[in-house]
Image (spheres, rainbow, N blue to C red):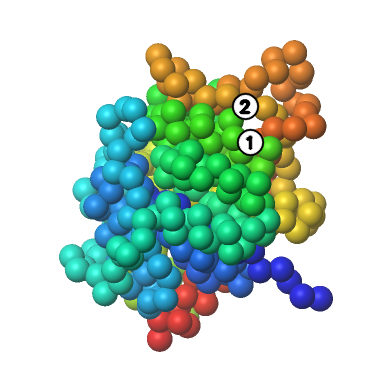
Amino acid sequence: MTIQQIPIWLDCDPGNDDAFAILLSLFSPRYKLLGISTVHGNAPLDMTTHNTLALLDLLNIFNVKVYKGEEKPLMNAPRYALNVHGITGIGGVELPDTSINKCVSSISYVNAMKNAIDAHAHEICLVVTGTMTNVALLIEKYPEVLGKIKYISVMGGSFGMGNATPYAEFNFHTDPHAAKIVMDKLQDRMILSPLNLTHKIVATSAVRKQIFDEEDKTTNSPLRKAFYDILMFYSMAYAKSDGTFGDPPLHDPVAVYSLLPLVDGDCALYGYQYLRRKLNIVVEGQREGESIIVNKSLPISESEDEGVYVGQNLDSEKFWNCMLDALHAAELNSK
């Protein structure tokens, strides 16, 4: 049986958890990474772009094209999360000031994304792990691409909780107008990984030991140590009240992984559960960036026939096995 390889375009703002999304996109055999566009978000655009290029260097990858995207939201002033991701946008690891990889400057990110969608029409999936500014501008400039996108898998949103405000998740809060544009145009093909899901997929002590174990020579390579340090720096944001490390969620690669159940048409295989609901995004006021379920008359636990595929659960062990397999493949590639 031939396993389908999914052509994907990654739009990201590295970011500690974006580093793992890049790793999974590159080194899981299920994905064919067509290109990467960077965007403002976890850090200013220059930082997120440099971090992307330097991560590709670290992973010994020099054949993936990177395009510099938007440096600010559609309407709001920029907001960053350097308090979570460190002063460079990726804390815990020292990336070189100058990368070997360079951005493509001969074509804009918007045109590069359009070309990739045209070349892989009806098969390509967009994965968005940062703000949706780039994608909003893409579909406004080229609305004809809407019918050619198979799925758009988004890390964003939350229900009854938030990490930017009590109501809103960071990506949606940072550019709510872009999130609303994309949601309105693509929600019937949108797979959403909200905080409610990603907070369930945590890096336990057992997982962390499989990423890097100083006492095990098979898991103590420099590449493993780098990704372990990226993860552990991120975990400081989830420290317990007594100052000890908590088990950190790893939000962004969940959006990459969540393509598999729907593309394969076998949610049970992945332990993946979703609700399908029509959503809206609050664009101003105290609840700016909040994800809103439109139809309040339907019980919260019931799906509609249309709308966003809102991830509820997935098999955490299978996710981490996939993530660890990608790390092992990256390690072999770096030697």
Residue 254 appears left or right of 162: right
* Residue 103 visible from this viewpoint: yes
Q: Which residue is mark 2?
A: 279
Which mark is nearer the camera, 1 or 2? 1
Q: Is residue 26 above or below residue 37?
A: below
Residue beneath the point at 26% across and 74% down: 100
Q: Is residue 206 above or below residue 153?
A: below
| Mark carried by residue 157 | none
Residue 168: image location, x then y, percent: 46, 26
Q: Residues within 10 Å of mark 2 (few under 14, many from 20)?
A: some
Q: Is residue 251 above or below residue 321?
A: above
Q: Amino acid at mark 1?
A: Gln
Residue beneath the point at 53% across and 36% down: 182
Numbered disc 2: secondary structure: strand
Q: Residues within 10 Å of mark 1 (few under 14, many from 20)?
A: many
Q: Residue 219 occupies which quadrant of the picture?
A: bottom left
Q: Residue 265 occupies which quadrant of the picture?
A: bottom right
Q: Which residue is mark 1?
A: 187
Residue beneath the point at 64% across and 51% down: 148
Residue 268: image location, x then y, percent: 79, 52
Residue 78: image location, x then y, percent: 28, 34
Label 1 close to label 2 by CB (< 8 Å): yes
Residue 140 appears left or right of 58: right
Name the N-terminal-most of marks 1 and 2: 1
* Residue 204 visible from this viewpoint: no
